[in-house]
Image (cartoon, rainbow, N blue to C red):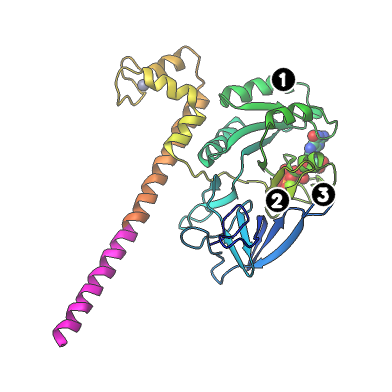
Amino acid sequence: MPTVDGVDEDGTRTDEGRISRVDRGSVSVLLPAAGPGEEPAELTIATGRDGTLPAVVGDPLHPAVGDRVVVDGDRTLVAPRTSELARDGSDRTSVEQVIAANVDVVVIVEHLEPAPSLGRLERMLTIAWRSGAIPLVVLTKADLVSDAAHWVTEAGAVAPGVGVVAISASTGAGLDELEVHLGEAQTLVLIGPSGAGKSTLVNALAGADVMVTGVVRGDGRGMHTTTHRQLVPLPGGRLLIDTPGLRSVGIVATEEAVAATFEDIAALVELCRFNDCAHEREPGCAVVAALDAGELSERRFESWRKLQREARRQAARADHRIAAEQRRQVRTRGRDAREASRIKSRR
Ligand SMILES: Nc1nc2c(ncn2[C@@H]2O[C@H](COP(=O)(O)OP(=O)(O)OP(=O)(O)O)[C@@H](O)[C@H]2O)c(=O)[nH]1
Ligand SMILES: [Mg+2]
Ligand SMILES: [Zn+2]
């Protein structure tokens, strides 16, 4: 079996790459440059009829941008993921949709003009915390506003423990600070609403026009909105995944991810007198006390409640799917057993 470090057990060389784009029927794989001064190579590999690729371990899976693959002769195997940024599939029956795999930092991009949406930030933070990667908030178009510092504070308050940077791709302001926040991170994904300036930021970081960016039309919508997820190599070896704007963030959440996003409220809950406090009218409720004292905004409280409900609903839905699968297996096993005894009795 090929190993992910690029050498087969029998000593033959295999190539390790990253999936840079997923299309119907095929994926593109970016292979690192063979040596200094050489260009990275890009391969196109066909997926199975069901859109899957075989995995190094376990069942075949639906490849996502950022997946690590081992190209071994005519076989391409997907390596286990270290992180997975996912959102809820658009239709109710579909399972979660993986936006990007194996990322170190989820860059949450939100425009300063028009004014940022704190609620959207909270939703994006929740899917980021759930991914296993570290979130970072980038507020764009700082050149268009005079109150960028105010919004950095506001965003910081809804993103406890998360870095917040205001930038302008037009003037280059904030890009050095962004670099500091990125630290050692090797793979980044940009998420955020359409027109926030994700592709413009990719180009600024790449130092070249690698992505086509939006020309804002009269109706305020971009003409060149990004339509597919794309992994782009940056000078210096980092990899950046650009994504189409999220119209709504159907969250894939766990209660842990919601608690990480609302760390301030989670800390208050610990102080409530009763373990099963509903934070309504119970005596000794620290959450209500913070609301009354104006230390916690009604908006954030409602947002927390809503995301918690969504996370619970989702957990129940997942349980439902597991239960349905178990029932199906029991039925199949019962049928197999009946079939086996019929065969036996016929003998
Ligand atoms: N003034 C100013 N305009 C910016 C900045 N960043 C992006 N823009 C403009 O905002 C518009 C949208 O930028 P894009 O980079 O295409 O936005 P996007 O987030 O990639 O949008 P989607 O691909 O639709 O998700 C373009 O017209 C950019 O020129 C900035 O820092 N300052
Ligand atoms: Mg774009
Ligand atoms: Zn309480």
Residue where numbered disc 1 is placed: 149
Q: Quadrant of the C terminus?
A: bottom left
Q: Nearer the viewer, mark 1 or mark 3?
A: 3
- The extreme bottom residue here reads 347
What type is the residue that disc 2 sits on? Leu
The residue that mark 2 highlights is 231
The amino acid sitting under disc 3 is Pro
Q: Which residues are magenta?
A: 324-347
The answer to whether any part of residue 220 appears in the image is no
For this orientation, the residue located farthest to the front is: 11
Horizontally, is 324 left or right of 97 in the view? left
Looking at the image, residue 228 sits to the left or right of residue 272; the answer is right
Badge 2 marks a residue whose secondary structure is strand
Say whether marks 1 and 3 touch (CB < 8 Å). Answer: no
Q: Which residue is mark 3?
A: 36
The residue shown at (63%, 70%) is 74
- Queried whether the magenta region covers residue 226, the answer comes back as no
Decide which of tag 3 and tag 2 comes sooner along the chain: 3
Q: Residues within 10 Å of mark 2 (few under 14, many from 20)?
A: many
